[in-house]
Image (cartoon, grey):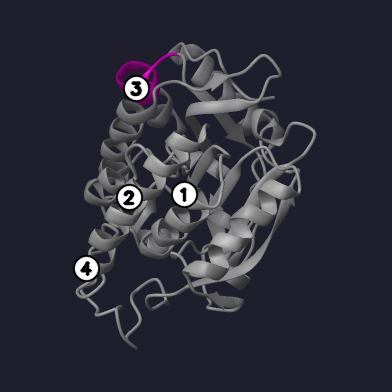
Amino acid sequence: MNRGAQASRAALAAARAAIARERLHACTLCPRRCGKDRSGAERGECGLGSAAVVASHGPHFGEEPPLVGWGGSGAVFFSGCNLHCVFCQNHDISQSAHGETVEADRLAGIFLELQTRGCHNLNLVSPTHVVAAILAALALASERGLHLPVVYNCGGYESLDTLALLDGLVDIYMPDFKYGVEGPDRLYSAAPGYPGICRAALREMHRQVGDLKVDELGLARRGLLLRHLVLPGGLAGSRAVAEFVANEISANTYVNVMGQYRPSHRAAEHPELTRRPTTDELAAARELFREAGLTRLAR
């Protein structure tokens, strides 16, 4: 990205940040539309006010290969979340406000530090509820020379109005598609309507950035990278996820069908979640994606 493009991104991010800040007064940044006045001392359903809270940041080597390369993905883990997954493996940060409370200048400095450390991208982890703060920081960091691809690493429970603010600023969308059917969304994540909301969000993300594109070194530059966590007993509705993505997004979608589920946080409250998926369940879930016609499956 040349200096002119950086300046354009800075101006666009600053304008969008102003809109996002206005939406904090009666918060509508995520589909919960909790209406809390997060511009002041009040906290939203996500657990935060206006400022972002950073739990940790640094090169991350546990992401998909096109993001990691040799220098790592520049991950910024934000505390708080707009989902309340009973099995969350990051519940110590997602369900709390523990970490460093940062204003825009400090957050911009973190973005630039990751670039200086040789990371291949800026990976914003659980960013949905702090979009206003991120956009303000992105404006400052772009003015100061940030040129990394921006990765929006989210849970898939996204507002179309908020995604519109990110158009032209996010290079790589990396959403989860947690549930392909209704029922588990409300029971396990307190997120009613998740499947339909996620489907609409995926359409908009793909409209903005298209299929995942990698450069000659195998590094992701732009596009959609989708994750789907396999739950025990087929509870995630994997068939519905696979068929929707193949038929209504793109058969060329890069998909990571993940087998990392383990009982965590409050999973013990639901007997059906107290075990890991079996080897056969994982294989069957991955086969559903292949049968749907999806060929770019992460290994």
Identify the residue at horizontal 71%, vertical 33% (top origin).
279
Q: Which residue is mark 2?
A: 158
**Quarter of the image with the C terminus in it:** top right
The answer to whether residue 21 is above or below residue 122 is: below
Tell me the element at label 3: helix
Find residue 154 and name its label: 1
Residue 82 visible in the shown view? no
Q: CA distance from mark 1 to mark 3?
A: 18 Å
Instruction: Give yes or no for residue 5 being in the magenta stretch.
Output: no
Q: Are marks 2 and 3 in contact (CB under 8 Å)?
A: no
User: Magenta span: helix, strand or loop, mainly?
Assistant: helix
Residue range of the region highlighted in magenta in the rendering: 243-251
Identify the residue at horizontal 80%, vertical 33% (top origin).
70
Image coordinates of residue 96 in percent, x first then y, are 53, 77
Image coordinates of residue 179 in percent, x first then y, are 40, 43
Q: Which residue is mark 3?
A: 249
Amino acid type indicated by mark 4: Glu
Q: Which residue is mark 4?
A: 22
Amino acid type indicated by mark 2: Glu
Query: Dot 4: few (<14), some (14–19), or many (≥20) neighbours within 10 Å?
Result: some
Corner quadrant of residue 18: bottom left
Q: CA distance from mark 2 to mark 1?
A: 8 Å
